[in-house]
Image (tube, coloured by chain):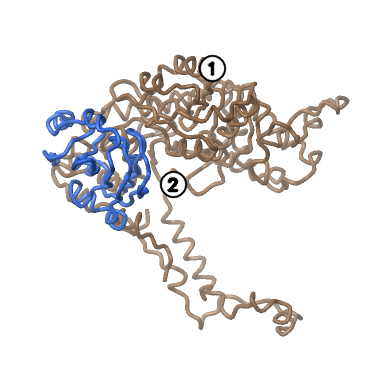
Chain colours: A blue, B brown
Amino acid sequence: MSDIRIDVLYTKNDEWVKVENDIATIGITDYAQSHLGDIVFVEPCEEGQEIKKNDVLTTVESVKSAADIYSPISGVVTEFNASIDEEADIMNKEPFDGGWICKMKITNPDDLKDLLSPDQYRAAKVD
Amino acid sequence: MSTLKVELLYERSNAEKEGYTLPYTEIEEDYVMDTIPKQWQRDKIGLPSVTETEVARHFYNLALLNYGVENGMYPLGSCTMKYNPKMNEEIASLNGFQKVHPLQMDDTLAGNLFLMYDLEDMLCAINGMDAFTLAPAAGAHGEYVGMSIIRAYFKDRGESNTRTKILIPESAHGTNPASAISAGFSVVEIKSTKTGEVDMDSLKANLTPEVAGIMLTNPNTAGMFEKNIKEIADLLHRNGSLLYYDGANLNAIIGYARPGDMGFDVVHLNLHKTFSTPHGGGGPGSGPVGVKERLIPYLPNPRVILNEVNKHNEEVEDRLIRKDDFKKSIGRIRLTDSSFGVLVKTYAYLLTLGENNIKNVAVNSVLNANYVRVMLKDDLKCYIDGICMHECVLSAKPLEKYGITALDIAKRLMDYGYHPPTNYFPLIIPEALMIEPTETESKEDLDKFIETMKIIVQEAKDNPKLLKDAPTKTPIRRTNDVKAAKDLNVAWK
């Protein structure tokens, strides 16, 4: 069973969002990384870039496939995780910690209402 | 398959060996050195010093490492790796086909132009289209040409600024979005159902006035027939949008169903896949693009047409010309006119089979895929219920509890002398193994493959290490996928 953290919110597309004040940290879940397989490359997001909910935030390439990651919320990118640019496999090893993708300034707090709670996400992932 | 490790010629190189002698020349070295500008002169050219015997052995032994459909079954899903009749190679290498030059005058190429003209007719008949260009060099080139035709059509209608989006199902071949974007469109992904079909709700939600068209493969990449195709076509056409058919899976329906009748406006074929040219070795391929009447003006230049001026000549051959100045054409798309050898093989293949026998391609490829599916569905898992088309998707998910993945099964198959099936595609099926046996495998060979798969599934349960260590009978064992993707270095030193 894959790891599901209780201190973050989720999307049904297997992203997690951690909210601290008006800043959201975004990453992919343990379930997502295990299905992608060994991750080899992540397209860097541009800082200052304005992104709408459901737009492509980045593309994650693994040895199996390339997957678009859709932004769970609308916002402005404030930071891209430089360590996944150097060593993308940290997303496999620590999807919820060192493997975060980017931080965003939340522009529409209502977007957060559409995210799943850990329990809702767990229920959605029962095979 | 040989397990021999073949040394690089550079590894064998030894400066004291000289494998060549140059012919006597009256030109003196000083003269050469004075003539060639300094910056182009080299002391060393870095070629290996080896004898002719060594060179011959090197390439012969490399050839032994090759694996093709002549070695054994090659069930690579979505690729149609079928046996291609040798007779067609023989025909394509006849002097009249092989030793002509594309820049020769039209009246010296009458027979070859007739072949192109007649082949265009045949492809129109098979696909239900009104005209074809034979120019594109392969499938993705065909996609790009098809997308460019769609763009030219909307530009001509003054809609180039408003028709900016192409819809593509998430289960599509990766080349589809790449081609649409290269041709200047943006891509909107449409959700797929569990059987890989277009999700109609997602389609309707995204069908805005900006949509120039949709790119579809039918049967789709999960090997299932897109049953809603008529409704999809009506929706798109009512919206003023066009339908593009990716011919990758034409093998499954050839002679029975025509993309043109389903409502497609543009199709591309892979002659090197469906019509008797071995592929996978780097080409040449051929990806003709067919269109409905309203798109004919935009086809690439040149086109082989009947010259109406020369009406006194009775024979069609004598009236054929390559016309290269169609005003609305998207222009020339490559230096030469076509991959002509591939066209010859296609023509010979179609003439050999004829209208009735071509149907057996579809019948037997679909039958073979379903036989494999039914025989293996209890050993592996079949996420998609029901009859598939020319390929079946099985899942290695039930073996997860033994630590075995689709990749492990694929590698173990190599130990048994098979080319692995496609794995991890389509992405919508977990641990996918996509098997396309093609119509050219006999029941005996299918039975052997099925038995081998059953043995491997049993091995996965009893002794998973056998799979984890595979392949063991190849010169190079399990490759490091991560290193190959991140740190690829193919230089010797």
Q: Residue at x 68, y 38 (%)?
A: B331
Query: In the figure, is residue B207 to the left or right of B358?
Result: left
**Which amino acid type is shown beneath numbered disc 1?**
Asp
Query: In the figure, is residue B349 to the left or right of B13?
Result: right
- Between B82 and B214, the residue placed more toward the observer is B214
Image mark for residue B68: 2
Q: Chain of mark 2?
A: B
Residue B320 on image: x %, y %: 77, 32
Q: Are marks 1 and 2 on the same chain?
A: yes
Image mark for residue B174: none
**Which amino acid type is shown beneath numbered disc 2?**
Gly
For disc 1, the marked residue is B261
Question: Which callout, 1 or 2, points at the residue further toward the start of the chain?
Answer: 2
Residue B28 on image: x %, y %: 74, 83
Which image quadrant: the C terminus of chain A?
A: top left
Residue B141 on image: x %, y %: 55, 40
Picture quadrant where residue B20 is located: bottom right
* Residue B431 visible to an observer of this rendering: yes
Which image quadrant: the N terminus of chain A?
A: top left
Q: Residue at x 20, y 35 (%)?
A: A10
Secondary structure of residue under mark 1: helix
